[in-house]
Amino acid sequence: MKILVTGGLGYIGSHTVIELITEGYQVVIVDNLVNSQIEMLAKIEKLAKQKIPFYQVDCTDENNLEEVFLDHQFSGIIHFAGLKAVGESVSLPLNYYYNNVTSTITLAKLAFKYRIEKFIFSSSATVYGDQKSPLIETMPQGVTTNPYGETKAISERILSDAAKINENFNVALLRYFNPIGAHKSGLIGELPTGIPNNLMPYITQTAKGIRKQLYVFGDDYDTLDGTGVRDYIHVVDLAKGHVAALKYNLSGAEIFNLGTGKGTSVFEIITAFERVNKIKIPYVVTERRAGDIAISYADPTKAQKNLNWRAELTIDDMVKDAWRFEKNLK
Ligand code: NAD
Ligand code: WQD
C-alpha cells in the first residue's frame, strides 16, 4: 500500500513516515520546504533504513502535484502540509487561507480524479473553540479565534461535503491536541523557525540557554494552579494514530480526537521537565496571551474504541524526548 504524505518533512509528518514504514507501508513525500529543511529527508531515510521518494512541490500547485499522482498509484493520502503559526496567521490571513484551504481542495480534487479512497486530514482541537473539556467529537465546531484555526474548521467542512457526494472518498478528520516530544533516536523532532510560539520548544530552548527565560502566559486562570491546561500528546503516539486511521474501515467523513484525555498545566510541565532532565527552567509569569483558553483536553474514547489506538507515552517521556532532541541539535 502506497501512501502520499504531504508535509512529510515537517514535525508530525516525519514521525508518521517512520511509523508507516515500520508498519510496512510504502511512502511518497511531498513538501515545499516552507517550514522544513531538505536535510530532514536523509534523517528520515536513516531511521526508516530505506530511500523515500520525495517531491519538492507546493500542494496548491495542481499541475505539479498531479505529476506525483501520475508517477505513483496511492491507496491513501495523509495531508499534513499547512502553515501552523497562530500569531502569524493573524498578520498574514490571506497566506494562511490560501495555503491551507487551497492545498486541501487541490488534493481532494486529485483524490477524486485518481480514485483514492482514504484521505487523512490534520485538523486541530482548536476547531472546538472555547467549549468545556473534555472535548468530544459530537460537539459542534466552536468559534475559532484566529485565521489558522478557521482554515482547519473550513477544511473540515470542505472535506465533509466532498465525502457526502462521493461514496469512494472517505475522510478521517484527526483533531490533534498538543503534540510535543520527539523520536527516541533524538534525530528528528520539532524545529521551529525563529522564536518558538509553543510551550515545549520554548522550554527546551530556555534549558539550552538560547532563550533567557520562559514567559508563562498567565497564572490567574480558573485551573488548579492558575496556568493553562492542555492535553499534551507524544508525537510518536500521534503518528501511530495516523496508521490506525489508515487501517480503519472509514465510511464518509469521520472525526477523531487524538489526545490522551489528561490535562496538564504549564507549571506541571515545567516541574516535570526540571525533575526528569535535572535542569532548572527560569521563568516569569506575564500577561495572558490573546486568544488562549484556560482548559483544553480530549475525550479520546472514540479513537480508542474505533481505531483501536491509545496514547501510551507519559509526560515524563515527552519532556525527556523533547530535551534529548534539543540537546543533540548543533
Ligand atoms: P510543520 O510546519 O512542522 O510541518 C508542515 C510541513 O508542511 C512543513 O514541512 C512545510 O514545509 C510543509 N508545507 C506547508 N505548506 C505547504 C504546501 N502548500 N505545500 C507543500 N508543503 C507545505 O507542522 P506540524 O507541526 O508537523 O503540523 C502538521 C500539520 O498538523 C499541519 O497541518 C498543522 O496545522 C497540523 N497541526 C499541528 C499541530 C501542532 O501543534 N504541531 C496541532 C494541530 C494540528
Ligand atoms: C500551551 C500552553 C499557553 C508558550 C497551539 C495552537 C493549536 C495547535 C497547538 C497547531 C498555553 C502556555 C505557551 C509560552 C506559555 N497548533 N504558554 N508560554 O496554544 O494550546 O495550541 O498549538 O495546530 O492550534 O493554538 O499551545 O504550546 O502555544 O501553549 O505559558 O511561551 O502553554 O498559554 O496555556 P496551544 P502552546
Image (cartoon, rainbow, N blue to C red):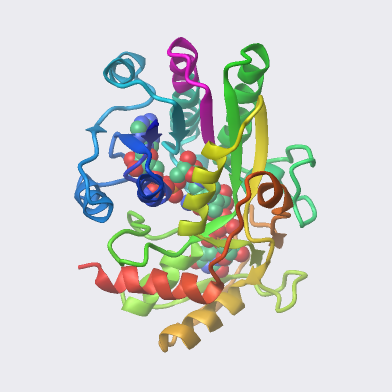
Q: Residue 22 location in percent, x, y?
A: 37, 50
Ligand 2: which quarter?
bottom right
In this rendering, the answer to whether 42 lies above or below 182 is above
Q: Is residue 137 left or right of residue 43?
A: right
Front residue (pair 66, 83): 66
Q: Quadrant of the C terminus?
A: bottom left
In this rendering, the answer to whether 41 lies above or below 116 is below
Front residue (pair 66, 208): 66
Q: Residue 41 location in percent, x, y?
A: 23, 46
Q: Identify which residue is drawn at 28% across, 51% down.
A: 48
Q: Identify which residue is drawn at 46% across, 84% down.
A: 276
Q: Residue 66 location in percent, x, y?
A: 33, 16
Residue 326 visible in the shown view: yes
Front residue (pair 174, 62): 174
In this rendering, the answer to whether 107 lies above or below 273 is above
Q: Is residue 197 left or right of residue 314?
A: left
Q: How many marks?
A: 0
* Residue segment shown in magenta: 106-121
Q: Quadrant of the N terminus?
A: top left
Q: Identify which residue is drawn at 43% across, 16% down.
A: 110
User: In the current view of this chain or complex, which residue is farthest to the front?
Assistant: 24
Residue 86 visible in the shown view: no
Q: Identify which residue is drawn at 44% across, 19% down.
A: 106
**Residue 116 included in the magenta stretch of the image:** yes
Q: Residue 277 location in percent, x, y?
A: 42, 84
Give the image quarter of residue 265: bottom right
